[in-house]
Amino acid sequence: MLAGGLAGVGAAAAGPFLLPTAASAAVPAAPSGGSSRVFTLAIIPDTQYLFDGEALHPEPLAETMKYLAGIKDLAFAAHLGDVTQNGRATEIEAAKGPFGILAKKKIPFSVLAGNHDLPNSGTDDQRGRTPFLDTLPPLAGRQRIAQDAGGYNSAYSFDGAGTTFLLLALDWRLSAAGIAWARSVLEANAQTPTIITVHDALSADGGTPVLSSHGKLVWDNLIKDHEQVFLSINGHFWPSGRLTQTNAAGNPVELHLANYQELYYGGAAAVRLYRFDLDRGVVDVSTEVPYISGHGLNQLEREELQLTAGTDRFSFALPAALRAPTPRDPRPASAMVTAGTEAYWRFEGSGSLAAGRTVEDASGRGNTLVATGPSTVPLAFTVDSHPSQPARGSVRFTGTKDTGAYLRTVDAAPLNKASFDKGYTFEAFFKLPEPFTGDSAWSALISRWVSAKTAGRAIGDVDEPTATLSISGGRELQWCVYPTNLDRSTTNWGHELRTTRWWHVAVVNDGRNTTMYIDGCAVVRNPSTVNKGLAGAESGAPWAVGAYSWAGELDKTWIGTIGDIRIVSRPLDPREFMIA
């Protein structure tokens, strides 16, 4: 408190860790419940006034630890130092019990020494044994990958929603040897996203956040030149604060100060929660006081411990490399040809896909695709793909109706005569371009090349295809079909999709209802109308990939990228999707 050689951890993602130029500072949104790439990091600031001589009050910290143990997606917990006021053995022993709650639950955590945890705070990390070193760090051994010779600096790896993170828990006063050790850890793990916790770094006295002298030491020696460090958190000073600085690579680094010991009941073991959402690319930060909220607030507690200021509740952007899921290993076509598979196309190749070239049907049923249409701008193979796509390849469409090309099934393709009366599943991987312009709107991922009018329908826009999976001008997926049991169309709608990222869509019909899924999640605008089958089979009309027809004539070609497409003549459970 102060008022006013190591083997590398496996890299989670390759490439530099680039932060956007601006990070938001808003009240955090609720974590996206449908995402599997969400986890929580807990930060516990100075608790020294709870363990001060004869005034020993472990209950607030114990309540916080129990609260953390109940967070299902908690990946790691880190204490920022000044666990106690005087560093006495009796104080340390009283604090040991709450930390034991995490240890018993096998929740990985770290704890570092603040100046008040030491009999002589004028020493650095080479000071030798203390009651703190003998008692608390041994409890925090789970997932510790290294510790320096003095024992006061430690490195931890933890799994955050499938991504490996590194956390350095550093002493309140780093020696030259401590800095050299920490640098060796960072250099051995240059591709692992890293968080640094240290007791003394950022001060916000008077409301202006600045680095302390020790904070400058940490910045200059450990953060500035190590691009994987995207976040540093410290206690020691009050009030809380936040600063963004640019590292040597030109990328912003988040520097946070969290400390509440000056508030009622010594802050009552308030805890800072960092909720990482890797799919949104955002960390939502909030500050909770489990001990107080557990028994209701009196007036003083309401005034002091409702922590909703901009430095206690905010959001910031993650490095770009952390937003992309780690790609799965490719899977052979045979593994994807499930029962009822009618067609399965994988776009594995190189160079251009000029007019006349074919893409074979990996299901073995003979639904060959042939490149056709205007070929001024031919289709092109690419290795770009959705991280969960079975094949590592796709085809890029860049032309327009007058210049581009598309793919159509050959005349003899069995798919052309399929009516799907017992249900179906259409799956596709795709990516929208940036910018998304009018030329991109209302093109189709896949559509049946026959109009509703030709198929005998008289209600609705009967010049449209009998089945089409299109993208609207608002970047919403539309599955518009004329079922075999209705004279009119039914439509499923998705939501507005981001450009330049890969998506998976599945449209599933069980013989009664049709449900659209995006990245395995059902969308809200699925119709309740009973519908079965797909009209147009009687004409034997081909299917088109990357094109939309109107009155039987080419109207739009797709602009963007398309990956694996699979069509199955039965409803698949989401657990059977290609992304599962």
Image (spheres, helix red, strand yellow):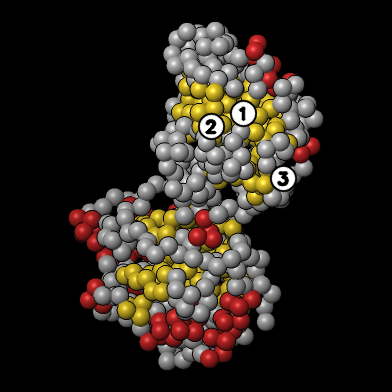
Q: Indicate left or right for 190 with 453 as reference.
A: right
Identify the disc placed on residue 134: none
User: How far across and down, in percent of the image, does residue 363 sit?
Assistant: 76, 31
Relative to the observer, which residue lies in front, 289 or 563?
Answer: 563
The residue that mark 1 highlights is: 544
State which tag comes first along the sequence, 1 or 2.
Answer: 2
Query: Label 1 vs label 2: CA separation?
Result: 9 Å
State which tag comes first along the sequence, 3 or 2.
Answer: 3
Residue type of the residue flagged with mark 3: Glu
Q: Secondary structure at mark 2?
A: strand
Asked if disc 1 and disc 3 are in contact, CB closer than 8 Å, the reply is no
Identity of the residue drawn at 67% across and 47% down: 352
Identity of the residue drawn at 55% across and 39% down: 403
Residue type of the residue flagged with mark 2: Ala
Q: Nearer the viewer, mark 1 or mark 3?
A: 1
Asked if disc 3 and disc 2 are in contact, CB closer than 8 Å, the reply is no
Graded by Cα atoms within 10 Å as few (under 14), some (14 to 19) or many (20 or more), the crowding at tag 3 reads some
Residue 44 can be seen, yes or no: yes
Q: Quadrant of residue 107?
A: bottom right
Asked if disc 1 and disc 2 are in contact, CB closer than 8 Å, the reply is yes
User: How far across and down, in percent of the image, does residue 462 sit?
Assistant: 48, 14
User: Eyeballing the image, is 34 above or below 467?
Assistant: below
Residue 92 can be seen, yes or no: no
Identity of the residue drawn at 40% across and 36% down: 474
Q: Secondary structure at mark 3?
A: loop
The residue that mark 3 highlights is: 348
Identify the disc placed on residue 444: 2
Query: Label 3 vs label 2: CA separation?
Result: 21 Å
Q: Secondary structure at mark 1?
A: strand
